[in-house]
Image (tube, helix red, strand yellow):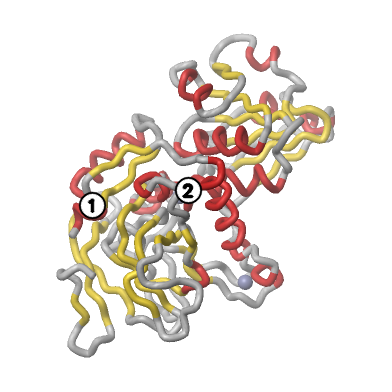
Amino acid sequence: MNRKVCWSPEDTILTVNAIAAPSATEPLVRTTIERRDLGPRDVLIEIRYAGVCHSDIHTVRGEWGSVPYPLTVGHEIVGRVAETGGEVTKHAVGDRVGVGCMVNSCRECENCRTGQEQYCLNGNTQTYAAVDRDGTVTQGGYSTHIVVDEDFVLRVPEAIPYEAAAPLLCAGITTYSPLSHWNAGPGTRVAVVGMGGLGHMAVKIAAAMGAEVTVLSQTLAKKDDGLAFGATHYHATREAGTFEALRNSFDLIINTVSAPIDMGAYLGLLRLNGTLVSVGAPAEPLPVPVFALFGSRASFAGSSIGGIAETQRMLDFCAERGIAPEVEIIKADEINEAYERVLSSDVRYRFVIDVDTLR
Ligand SMILES: [Zn+2]
Ligand SMILES: [Zn+2]
């Protein structure tokens, strides 16, 4: 374990290095945060890599509601188990593990009991900016260590490159879950709207599931990448005639864009019984022209990350199929510049913090 980590004299609190947002308008800064003492079912993880998700930026800037500052974000976390509580059975010291967007749930409601903790009826506990069941505010993965209940810790197969594994914990599962739920596979045609952090993973996973994949992006700037990731077709939505040419083409459309889209135009691309699923989250409501649903008995749906068991299936699937996110590794001190580049879509395709630069 790292020397800079020190348990307090009472041995109840662990102080660790982190990057935190002091307020909605200031840059992120280096600081220290506290982790709770290991409970019997807790795992202490020495974090190695942390992905930078667009949600992190929305959150620290207060765009998704009030925030308990100072706040450390990050919910794409991989590292090694450094210590385990006395009753831990699922993970051992030295294991390569991951943590995604949630660190707890009620475990008793009907959704938790069916392994869909992301839809916990009593609210799952988010990895950062949430009040944990012990009353403390959760702090995320831009830090050297985290303490998490073993049930919310995933096994990260060694076959997945270490530095590329982190984004699977949010971008990977957020796209895998709807692709799996709506049965993407041989004989289905899937369109992916947007080729960013989420979109490029949707392309890779849908192609690995055996679907015929089409990318719908504003321009053809990333066409070569999209085809290399497994797409068969790539279209520019800004080009005249694209929507007309693609009418009645897709069984499933995964919308990863968080800006408003022309719902009528996209719903018109669905085949009979097709579904348009949004995983991107625009701040404003999206108007849905109902007549666009009638013509193909279409559905408009949303989807939120995935349950713990499903997230493990996704990691195992990616390991078996040799799929990993495309990442750009940054140092801890480059985080503010990275945020600006995410906001201008200048990243291919996910920034990942090398947490060794924070020790
Ligand atoms: Zn995320
Ligand atoms: Zn629950």
Q: How many marks?
A: 2
What residue is at 50 percent from the left and 68 percent from the top? 152
Query: Dot 2, crowdedness within 10 Å: few (<14), some or many (≥20)?
Result: many
In the shown orientation, is residue 136 left or right of residue 119? Answer: left
Q: Say which residue label 1 marks.
A: 28
**Ligand 2 quadrant in view:** bottom right
> What is the three-letter code of the residue carrying label 1?
Leu
Crowding near the residue tagged with mark 1, few <14, some 14–19, many ≥20 C-alpha atoms within 10 Å: many
Quadrant hosting residue 251: top right
Query: Relative to the observer, which residue lies in front, 92 or 212?
Result: 92
SS class of the residue under badge 2? helix
Could you say which disc has been placed on residue 49 in the image?
none
Q: Which residue is mark 2?
A: 168
Of 322 and 256, which appears nearest the observer?
Answer: 322
Q: Is mark 1 within 8 Å of ligand 1?
A: no
Q: Is residue 99 left or right of residue 275?
A: left
In which quadrant of the rendered view does residue 358 lie? Answer: bottom left
Where residue 50 sits in the image (x, y, percent)? Answer: 34, 52
Q: Quadrant of the C terminus?
A: bottom left
Q: Which quadrant of the rendered structure holds the N terminus?
A: bottom left
Residue 109 in the image: above or below residue 207 = below
Could you say where residue 232 lies in the image, as x and y percent from the top left?
A: 61, 21
Can residue 236 be seen in this snapshot? yes
Of labels 2 and 1, earlier in sequence is 1
Tag 2: amino acid:
Leu
